[in-house]
Image (cartoon, grey):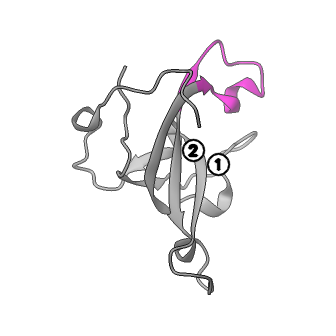
Amino acid sequence: MSTRFVPGQRVRIADRNAPGHVRTPVYVRGREGRIERVLPRFLNPEREAYGVNEGTDVRLYRVRIEQSALWPDYDGPAGDVLELEIYEHWLEPLDPRDAPARNARPAPSATATR
């Protein structure tokens, strides 16, 4: 199985106003980050919350965002980052030439450690 994104790849978190149960915090929507780690697939919590999942699972990624990119007045150390887990359908390649097929790599097994 392959993944859409790979560690080190630059991404943008989609900036959409999704109603209902959403696991992507508002303060990171529209922000740029970098894939830190590829995680296993899990049931889609946005559908599972309403009992309409029907077994649909989606890839989860750990994304790293610079604190200064999130908070304009941030005055902590320059290297401070926020790492959070974002589902694949919320991520967009930052470079449109970064086609998913070009980046496809085997995904970690479901028993991979975090």
**Mark 2 nearby-residue class (10 Å; few <14, some 14–19, many ≥20):** many
Q: Nearer the viewer, mark 2 or mark 1?
A: 2
- Residue designated by label 1: 24
> Which quarter of the rendered picture does the C terminus lie within?
top right
Q: Are marks 2 and 1 in contact (CB under 8 Å)?
A: yes
Residue under label 2? 86
**Residue found farthest to the top:** 54
The quarter of the picture where residue 86 lies is top right
Answer with left or right where residue 104 lies relative to residue 1.
Answer: left
Asked whether 44 or 74 is in front, the reply is 74
Q: What stretch is highlighted in magenta?
A: 42-59
Task: Examine the structure image and report whether residue 52 is included in the region drawn in magenta.
Answer: yes
Total labels drawn: 2
Q: What element carries label 2?
A: strand
Q: Which residue lies furthest to the front in this view?
A: 113
Q: In which quarter of the image is residue 67?
A: bottom right
